[in-house]
Amino acid sequence: MASGMIALALATLLCCSAVLPAQTATTEPAAPKPAAAKPRPVLRTVAVLGYEVKWIDDPAERKELGEVLSTIVSDRLSAMDDLVIVERVEIEKLLAEQQLNLSGLVDERNRVKIGKLLGARFLLWGRGFKVGEQIYITTKAINVETGQFKGIIVQLPAGSGIAEVFTAVCDELVKKLPATLKALAPDEAPEISVIDALKLRFGDAKTSWLIAAHEEHRQVQPVVVVDPAVRNELEHLLSGAGQHVKSLNKGDARAVVDGEKTMRAFDPDVKCDYYLLAEGFSEFGRRLSGDLVVCTARVEVKVVDAKAGNVLAAGSIDRRATDLSEHLAGKQALRKAARHLFLDLSRKLFPEPAAKDNAGANP
């Protein structure tokens, strides 16, 4: 009797379980993962630490030509929009503070230390040797953070002149260095050019600029006619950043800089947003071995609010450059000075905008 009742109870439970809906497990939807912040784009900052030209026998000449090659490489690379070159004077000053000379930079730890103190992402360090009837110059590009490096090699006949050797080294670096640096840092923050950094500063604004730039080259002998390096560089930076640019001719620019005319005389309806007044001069410094010449330059720039007439920013800067002729060295020094000064003033005029997804740049 008892066993029959147990069997009946089990049957009843089975029947009930058959008609009850199955219970399914419920789970909360997974919270969406926050989007990873985009790394801030940065500029490729390069410091040319130095070159050892060991195929030169005379110690004094070897030291001088090593410094000259470092300067020429810096000057040539500074004309590239996707690189920012640490000035030689800053490198020399830091080396003096750290009590290091060129031989002390053979130690990789010293090179990386100097690179970090200079705020450089990459270092260039070179050595040249004579092997048989050939000269080999190797430039080592070093990632400051990882210590990884790649070499760029130039080979020339041993009878090549200094100017020919230096030109070949610069040409090879201009051609191969951007790809080399990219290969050394493929996973780091995205890199942008100086022009792209200026675009970020201007944002969506499309401003109109009127430039009055006067420049000259000073020397005891008859004046060498220098191309309008200051004006060309300012036009390149502003137009590349998407801004509207007009420039006064040489005579009108001179009249404005000398105070004989005003910018309003050339913009009577005040259609421009900014007036950019620039004055520069270069002068012969000294002649080095062979055909190499050093020139120095000084550039002064003033940015004026066209409508209000207020001076928004002003500054001056000195730069030097080494090249194969006085004409080229003077032009290079003026161009470098104009670029560095305008980039510095642009930071004050157009502060970095609030970053979206952490994107920004500091040229």
Image (tube, rainbow, N blue to C red):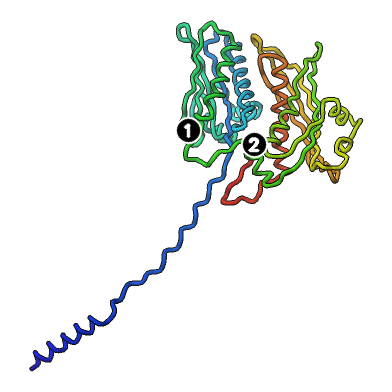
Secondary structure, mark 2, is: helix
Looking at the image, residue 158 lies above or below residue 47: above
- Residue in the image at 66% along x and 27% along y: 89
Q: At label 2, which amino acid type do we have?
A: Ile
Which residue is the site of mark 1?
184
Q: In the visual, does 322 lie left or right of 185?
A: right
Which mark sits nearer the N-terminus, 2 or 1?
1
Percent across and percent down for residue 128 are 51, 15
- Rendered image: mark on residue 198: none
Instruction: Give the position of the N terminus as an image quadrant.
Output: bottom left
- Please tell me in which quadrant of the rendered image residue 320 appears: top right
Seen as rendered, the residue at the extreme bottom is 1
Q: At label 1, which amino acid type do we have?
A: Leu
Looking at the image, residue 357 lies above or below residue 210: below
Nearer the observer, disc 2 or disc 1?
2
Percent across and percent down for residue 352 are 66, 46
Percent across and percent down for residue 355 are 61, 50
Which residue is the site of mark 2?
195
The residue lying toward the viewer, choosing from 5 and 314, is: 5
Percent across and percent down for residue 354 are 64, 51
Q: Mark 2 and mark 1: span between their CA atoms?
A: 23 Å
Instruction: Give the position of the C terminus as an image quadrant.
Output: top right
- Packing grade of label 1 (10 A; few <14, some 14-19, many >=20) is some
- Residue in the image at 77% along x and 32% along y: 316
- Residue in the image at 71% along x and 23% along y: 333
- Please tell me in which quadrant of the rendered image residue 200 appears: top right
- Please tell me in which quadrant of the rendered image residue 292 appears: top right
